[in-house]
Amino acid sequence: MKDKKFYYQVGGVALAVILGVLSGWGLTQLRSQKTTSSKSKGAIVAQPSGGEVKIGQTYGQKDGAFKDTAVGVLAKNDEKNSEGTHKLLRDGGPSQTVYLTSSVLDLDQFLGHKIQVWGETFSSRKVAWLMDVGRIKVLQ
């Protein structure tokens, strides 16, 4: 017959495995709740249909979590040593240009329009201001 020490060791290992499985399951449940709530907050307001944008209309995510905003005329970024697919030309000259990318909207649909963008600024070594755009309001 085995001694009590052996049974305590087996019980301790079994308890550790059970607690590990339960804590892992609990963390995945918590993460899935956060993902679901963040997706519902970031619902898409509208997408331009057929490339037709309307002045005064807002497109993209409706969540107000975007802390950065800028206003200017949207142009294609054709600079070779640059970042972003597009650029926002603002008053004050080239030093005020915002370079843009978007994982939410097709920025080509807004070319030539004066727009207000909301998004998140990313660090860049090549340009002064690089932003991932989440929402656009067409001003002109």
Image (spheres, rainbow, N blue to C red):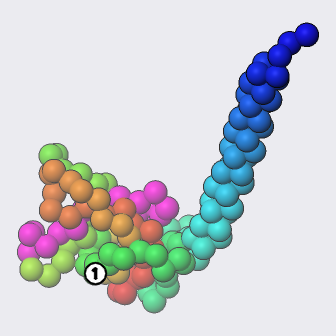
Residue 18 against residue 132 in the figure, above or below: above
Residue 92 against residue 76 in the figure, above or below: below
Query: Whole-percent x and y of residue 9?
Result: 74, 24
Residue at image coords 86%, 12%: 2
Residue at image coords 15%, 62%: 128
Question: Dividing the picture into quarters, in which one does residue 98 lie?
Answer: bottom left
Q: Is residue 95 magenta?
A: yes
| Local crowd size for mark 1, using a 10 Å CA cut-off: few (<14), some (14–19), many (≥20) | some
> Dividing the image into 4 quarters, which one contains the N terminus?
top right
From the viewer's side, name the closer residue of 54 and 134.
Answer: 134
In the shown orientation, is residue 88 left or right of residue 33? left
The residue carrying mark 1 is 71
> Dividing the image into 4 quarters, which one contains the C terminus?
bottom left
Q: Amino acid at mark 1?
A: Val
Residue at image coords 18%, 77%: 90
Q: In the current view of this chain or complex, which residue is farthest to the bottom?
A: 56
Question: Dividing the picture into quarters, in which one does residue 29 lie?
Answer: bottom right
Question: Dividing the picture into quarters, in which one does residue 46 lie?
Answer: bottom right
Q: Look at the image and tell me whether residue 91 can be seen.
A: yes
Residue at image coords 8%, 69%: 95
Question: How many numbered marks have been drawn onto this rendered protein structure?
Answer: 1
Query: Whole-percent x and y of residue 19?
Result: 73, 41
Residue 70 against residue 106 in the figure, above or below: below
In the shown orientation, is residue 132 left or right of residue 87? right
Query: Whole-percent x and y of residue 40?
Result: 65, 70
From the viewer's side, name the closer residue of 78 and 16.
Answer: 16
In terms of secondary structure, where does tag 1 sit?
Answer: strand
Residue 101 against residue 14 in the figure, above or below: below
From which residue to which does the magenta span run? Answer: 93-109
Q: Is residue 103 magenta?
A: yes
From the viewer's side, name the closer residue of 92 and 30.
Answer: 30
Q: Look at the image and tell me whether residue 53 can be seen.
A: no
